Image: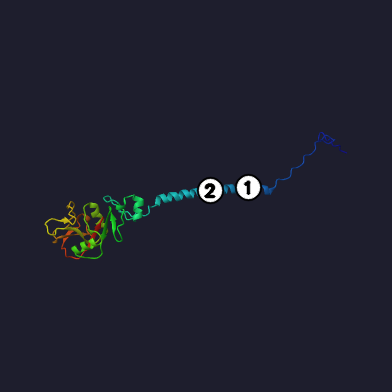
Amino acid sequence: MYVKLCNFGKYANGKSKPKQLQPDSDPWLDIHRKLRVYRIVSLVLFVICVLLLIVVLVLFMKLTGTQPCQNVEQTESSPPEQDCSLKKCHEVYQLPQRLCRDCGKGWLRFENTCYFLSQTRFSWQQSREECQRMGGDLAVITNERVQMYLSRKGSLHYWIGLSHLGTNEWTWINNTALTVRYWGNLSFPGECAILAGNEPPERSWHPSSCSLYLQYICQKM
């Protein structure tokens, strides 16, 4: 018979008491821990993907973005055409009201002046009267920028406010001196000037008979 020694943990024969075996770990607990790690890793990857997507979208917008409501036509020698509404003019350019006045339907704004290129045809005098009826007069071209702009906008022959009626010198209807000239063939007979929109702008003016029925260009401030 063995005698159990409580104080020394040995049997009577001097041999040590065998250790009790620990129960195996719970497999469901290990699975739960792994799942929690996977969820954390997945969340981190998702956040990284969202941040990368935002960066890509921002770069794409910067590379391909355009500015709205600025219908601008610009060349090396001409300033941009402002073709926005009256409200947009105030908001964007912060100009005085007299410079932001709306031109009206069918009119084009360029350098704070409104221009109208007609589709109907009249004689030179009738064209002038029609422009005056609309609050303006035949166009006066005093610089290269206006000449280039009107030449690009029109593709027909238009009356402009230049003539030598009753005089030997060409004069603008507002008595402005003829400081710039864009004459083409001056051999044509006539006392009124036309702008040929289908010809090179630097030589698109021609004399013509004032009684011819042509399109016309009006302007108003």
Helix, strand or loop under label 1? helix
Q: In which quarter of the image is the N terminus?
A: top right
Helix, strand or loop under label 2? helix
Label annotation for residue 47: 2
Q: Is residue 45 among what the camera can see?
A: yes
Q: Do the residues labelled 1 and 2 touch (CB within 8 Å)?
A: no
Q: Which of the 4 image quarters holds residue 72?
A: bottom left
Between 152 and 119, the residue placed more toward the observer is: 119
Pick whichever of labels 1 and 2 is earlier in the sequence.
Answer: 1
Q: Quadrant of the C terminus?
A: bottom left
Label 1 neighbour load within 10 Å: few <14, some 14-19, many 20+ = few
Answer left or right for 4 relative to 144: right
Q: How far apart are marks 1 and 2 (CA)?
A: 20 Å
**x 62%, y 49%: residue:** 35
Residue named by callout 1: 34
Answer left or right for 93 relative to 203: right
Residue 124 at x, y = what percent? 19, 63
Between 89 and 79, the residue placed more toward the observer is: 89
**x 64%, y 47%: residue:** 33
Label 2 neighbour load within 10 Å: few <14, some 14-19, many 20+ = few
The number of numbered badges drawn on the structure is 2
In the image, what residue type sits under mark 2? Val
Answer left or right for 20 relative to 60: right
**x 40%, y 50%: residue:** 63
Mark 1 vs mark 2: in front: 2
